[in-house]
Image: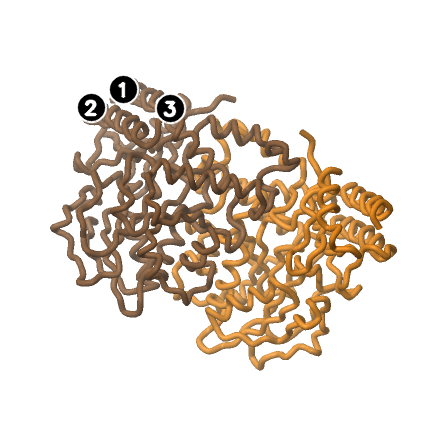
Chain colours: A brown, B orange
Amino acid sequence: MTRKFNFSAGPAALPEAVLERVRDDLPEYGDTGCSVMEISHRGRVFGDIAARAEADLRELLGIPEDYRVLFLQGGATAQFALVPMNLLRDDEIADYVVTGHWGKKARTEAARAGRINLSVDTVESGYTKIPPVDQWRLSEGAGYLHFTPNETIAGVEFPSEPGAVGAPLVADMSSNILSRPLDVSRYGLIYAGAQKNIGPAGLCVLIISDEVLARCRDDLPSVFSYRAQAEQGSMLNTPNTFAWYVAGLVFQWVKEQGGVEAMGERNRRKADLLYEAIDASGFYSNPVDRDARSRMNVPFTLADPSLDPVFLEEAEHAGLLALKGHRSVGGMRASLYNAMPIEGVRGLVDFMEGFERRHG
Amino acid sequence: MTRKFNFSAGPAALPEAVLERVRDDLPEYGDTGCSVMEISHRGRVFGDIAARAEADLRELLGIPEDYRVLFLQGGATAQFALVPMNLLRDDEIADYVVTGHWGKKARTEAARAGRINLSVDTVESGYTKIPPVDQWRLSEGAGYLHFTPNETIAGVEFPSEPGAVGAPLVADMSSNILSRPLDVSRYGLIYAGAQKNIGPAGLCVLIISDEVLARCRDDLPSVFSYRAQAEQGSMLNTPNTFAWYVAGLVFQWVKEQGGVEAMGERNRRKADLLYEAIDASGFYSNPVDRDARSRMNVPFTLADPSLDPVFLEEAEHAGLLALKGHRSVGGMRASLYNAMPIEGVRGLVDFMEGFERRHG
């Protein structure tokens, strides 16, 4: 069997070199006599793996000294609740900017744990826009402002970091972390579920400033407390050691590719290639504002939706997997995370042109 | 490199056949063209893996039809908080039976989320006893009673299921699930972190009766709600797909070994072998009441503690890993979970006898 081009929105493709390394580390990791899944998280071997993963991520993103990095379980969805549980004090309010499905979910979950103000909601546009900061309805003295820099379903992404809003910025970067350079110092808290650009599902990476950490509540069950987890180096309880190890391999791979500058350039080229093919065609279309289009997730529809199943079947036959769009948008979606090589996007564009000739 | 005998308390040894299968499934799972870490949890391929894992676990433990099985993230420590958050209504109280370190932790975390009564605490005995039910201080109309059937640090285990206490029984079976037959119908809720007898860390399996589920609160953030997770088949958000897949391989392996009856017999033989060697010696000792001794975790001390580092170094050299005892107990600890073959225990006993001859 040979590997195919996997456009899954998540759990998503991992670099082939990383998968081969994981395979080669089984059933024994180095000279330890057992696999990486079977060793104590508190021992020297895993301690080295964990520390190197953090150091490489710090190097890749230029994370300042006064930020903590946490490797937690529960996925980004757990953070939807844990962010307000940790960050909001008493009757404090948090601002939410909703530019897609995930921002909406984050806001819904947060509303079960704290007071929330909806600062932006682009649902009327079909989540195809990113309004500028001067149009956001901000609360006086908000505890934080939450937004989702990239939305995987409608395929809409902030073209750059938003300007200052007064409150600390909290960002769900699950689907675009490590995809381009990032100024961490602009944020109070960044969190990212691993299963797109970091590693396997079951891990969530948090980058939190000491300033925000210092104001976090400390009356939560400890497993949910950012402060308790930070004090214990994310080992308050047994972490997802396997995913942490794979994440470390992915960080090494990103460094070998030239870091996030190189990834950003490569991701821009990949996305340009696909959007140009869509825009040049009368057969495919994408409704998102050009300056808000995602470089990670490219949804597109066919002029004749009755051809959708034919497209998917022929694509799969051509080795192009998981292109079905989310049901709320319809059509197709190609996710172009870091592990997708440009050859995969070229293959997709060639296939799309051939499909249009045959069926258009 | 060859595999060694790994006595780690957790993350613990996995069956060698399972690790080889994981390796053979990389970088491609079957004819899918990608690995099991890279496929959608909502697709057919992972759906089959998830359903088979649940079906095999149901078969192994004889789980009644009116119980749900959940595969959640966060480890058992998250359940320490989520159990009271889900099960306790308003000013309801829960009874906690503390017979070791983990029961104490469960009680401490629960006290941050609800009203708790301490029904039993054996700390004064050094956690070496299991008092009978008629000595427990039970609350009138408790929402549930929580206990820890096996404690990994002091090595103390309930010899059988406790009798009826009125309230639904909630058990943290992280360290002894699947190690012997179990009457699930006696419990309201069983939970178990995976990293001892089920699979890699980062997964927690819950078995919950429909009756208990029906009384669970529904005003929690959905990711923390047992009812919401049950309604979504543990896929309210992306689950730890890799650990779920490995757990399924472990369940198949336990079936191939003859199921939990055969595992129980094998585990009894393994533990007997080691306890007999300890008791026959004047050099090694274990302080736990004989009828409360754990078949999973066997702590023992050396007559001369200054020999501890020598014992550990020589054991490691002999291919016997991770025998260092928990700092609160000192000495050694051999964890004999399902994946430890009897040959490993024989090897340990032979080594202990030789060590005593050389140094005793």
Q: Which mark is residue A276?
A: none
Question: Is residue B356 shown left or right of residue A255?
Answer: right
Q: Chain of mark 1?
A: A
The answer to whether residue B143 is above or below residue A48 is: below
Report the mark closest to the observer, 1 or 3: 1
Q: Amino acid at mark 1?
A: Glu
Real-space Cα distance between discs 1 and 2? 8 Å
Circle 2: is it few (<14), some (14-19), or many (20+) Cα within 10 Å? few
- Residue B62 visible in rendering: no
Report the mark closest to the observer, 2 or 3: 2
Q: Chain of mark 3?
A: A
Residue displayed at 39% across by 60% down? B221
- Front-most of residues B150 and B322: B322
x and y percentages locating residue A59 in the rendered image: 37, 37
Q: Which mark is residue A353?
A: 1
- Residue A340 visible in rendering: yes
The residue indicated by pointer 2 is A281
Whether label 1 touches label 2, CB < 8 Å: yes
Circle 1: is it few (<14), some (14-19), or many (20+) Cα within 10 Å? some
The residue indicated by pointer 3 is A314
Question: Is residue B323 shown left or right of residue B204?
Answer: right
* Sequence order check, earlier mark of 2 and 3: 2
Residue displayed at 71% across by 71% down? B125
Q: How many marks?
A: 3
Question: Is residue B25 shown left or right of residue A67?
Answer: right
Q: Amino acid at mark 3?
A: Glu
The answer to whether residue B93 is above or below residue B355 is: below
x and y percentages locating residue B349 in the rendered image: 81, 46
Whether label 2 touches label 3, CB < 8 Å: no
